[in-house]
Image (spheres, rainbow, N blue to C red):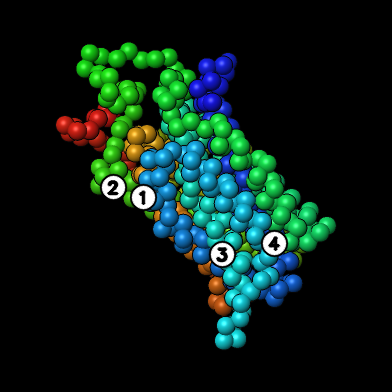
């Protein structure tokens, strides 16, 4: 089917692949931190759950994704992003619908365990943080090289749209029918938006359809090219194996910096609505601030995508980290609705870069051939950062911060500054010649 479409499409088929990947990226927000944030109040009010308990399900999913990410990366390289993303969409539909039964619990030795909520939401978080996050960016980075920054920026924009609409839809349904119906509605949205585009439109590489990255014209081959050998790639593109990549310091510095940024992102976004309401700013301000955060994430995704095509990725990554560090520090001064809205927008601007720059950096540094495996190796830093970032603010609020989130924002500021330094040292690795590997010219 993809071949027929590619032959008939009057434009580069990679744009359809990007659109299909974008639907999955949009739909994964059924399990996003901003989405669960609008459920914190109704769940805690009706079921008497603490914020730490609710956030713990997201943390459990993040921890699980830490272990599944390396497997997912290999599956993408072996079976393709289309297979992985289709299966992930189905699982996300089921797990989101199952959250309507969150009040089913088990009491053991006087301790109530909301096992349905934990299993269902943790499963959704695994899908959110591992196969969709890796699969969408990998397949887009394989279809685009010259335009890799801007296309990953567009992918970030689709995530931003989901960040805005999923909490909004959930809030409306909660107000009208309650939190149980809200989960049903979100599962239907995932089914309608993502499943069929992912299953029917995604192809793994442009070469599979007789095309070339970015829709460029076919390059000339040399006499040494073998009919059964690797498909030719652009002369500038590196071609690292995963075993060679893991021996470069840049890989681990990028992974560490990305993990720290996702720690800040998950902690801030999961607890933002509750934080603003604790500050006495009301539910409307809290809701609008979350929307602004997501809107500016989308706008800035396009900005950071174009910038990273022109400036070395490590410098752009450092700028993103510094933006988030300043944003986290500004939250500590939030006293008015105007400040909440302005600081949320500023923080969201940095989040757009957090989503766009690392995938581009990995692809630019190491090439397309083993990109799924390489992303799977590094993604545990991201998922672990998300898991810890979700739970730490709740623990601080409940046990350390005397019912305030302020110590968390001070911690996030320090971590953002560390990520800035780590990013600056993540210089692009030099590929040394070897008989069995393609050499990348620096």
Q: Write the residue at 48% across / 33% down.
A: 140
Work out how far the residue at label 3 is from the one at label 2, CA to CA, in angstroms. 33 Å
Residue under numbered circle 1: 377
Front residue of this view, candidates 370 and 208: 208
On the question of residue 147 being in view, the answer is yes
Label 4 vs label 2, nearer the camera = 4
Work out how far the residue at label 1 is from the one at label 3, CA to CA, in angstroms. 25 Å
Q: Write the residue at 60% across / 86% down.
A: 110
Residue under numbered circle 2: 246
Q: Earlier in the sequence, mark 4 or mark 2?
A: 4
Other-residue count near label 4 (Cα within 10 Å), few / some / many at <14 / 14–19 / ≥20: many
CB contact under 8 Å: marks 4 and 3: no
Q: Quadrant of the C terminus?
A: top left
Q: Quadrant of the N terminus?
A: top right
State left or right for residue 18 relative to residue 212: right
State left or right for residue 327 relative to residue 422: right
Work out how far the residue at label 1 is from the one at label 4, CA to CA, in angstroms. 34 Å
Q: Residue 338 got which mark?
A: none
CB contact under 8 Å: marks 1 and 2: yes
Q: 348 above or below 210?
A: below
Residue under numbered circle 4: 100
Task: Give the image quarter of residue 242.
Answer: top left
Task: Give the image quarter of residue 111.
Answer: bottom right
């Amino acid at each position: 089917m993809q071949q027929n479409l590619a032959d008939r499409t009057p434009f580069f088929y990679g744009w359809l692949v990007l659109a299909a990947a974008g639907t999955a990226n949009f739909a994964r927000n059924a399990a996003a931190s901003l989405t669960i944030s609008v459920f914190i109040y109704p769940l805690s009010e009706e079921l008497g759950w603490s914020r730490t308990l609710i956030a713990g399900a997201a943390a459990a999913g993040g921890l699980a994704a830490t272990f599944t990410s390396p497997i997912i990366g290999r599956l993408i390289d072996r079976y393709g992003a289309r297979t992985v993303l289709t299966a992930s969409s189905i699982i996300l539909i089921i797990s989101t619908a199952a959250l309507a039964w969150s009040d089913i619990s088990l009491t053991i030795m006087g301790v109530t365990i909301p096992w349905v909520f934990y299993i269902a939401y943790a499963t959704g978080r695994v899908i959110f943080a591992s196969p969709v996050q890796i699969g969408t960016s990998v397949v887009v980075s394989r279809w685009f090289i010259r335009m890799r920054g801007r296309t990953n920026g567009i992918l970030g924009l689709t995530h931003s749209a989901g960040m805005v609409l999923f909490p909004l839809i959930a809030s409306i349904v909660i107000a009208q029918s309650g939190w149980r119906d809200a989960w049903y509605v979100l599962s239907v949205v995932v089914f309608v938006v993502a499943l069929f585009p992912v299953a029917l439109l995604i192809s793994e590489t442009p070469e599979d359809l007789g095309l070339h990255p970015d829709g460029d014209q076919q390059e000339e081959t040399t006499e040494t090219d073998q009919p059964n050998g690797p498909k030719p790639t652009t002369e500038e593109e590196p071609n690292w194996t995963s075993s060679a990549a893991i021996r470069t310091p840049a890989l681990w510095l990028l992974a560490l910096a990305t993990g720290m940024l996702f720690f800040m992102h998950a902690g801030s976004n999961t607890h933002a609505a509750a934080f603003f309401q604790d500050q006495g700013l009301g539910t409307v301000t809290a809701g609008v601030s979350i929307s602004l955060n997501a809107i500016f994430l989308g706008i800035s995704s396009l900005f950071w995508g174009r910038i990273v095509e022109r400036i070395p990725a490590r410098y752009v990554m450092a700028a993103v980290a510094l933006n988030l560090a300043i944003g986290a520090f500004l939250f500590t001064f939030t006293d008015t609705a105007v400040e909440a809205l302005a600081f949320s927008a500023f923080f969201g601007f940095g989040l757009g870069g957090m989503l766009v720059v690392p995938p581009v950096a990995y692809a630019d540094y190491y090439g397309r051939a083993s990109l799924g495996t390489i992303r799977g190796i590094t993604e545990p830093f991201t998922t672990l950062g998300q898991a810890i970032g979700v739970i730490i603010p709740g623990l601080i609020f409940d046990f350390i911060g005397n019912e305030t989130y302020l110590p968390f924002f001070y911690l996030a500021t320090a971590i953002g500054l560390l990520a800035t330094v780590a990013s600056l040292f993540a210089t692009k690795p030099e590929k040394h010649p070897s008989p069995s590997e393609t050499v990348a010219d620096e």
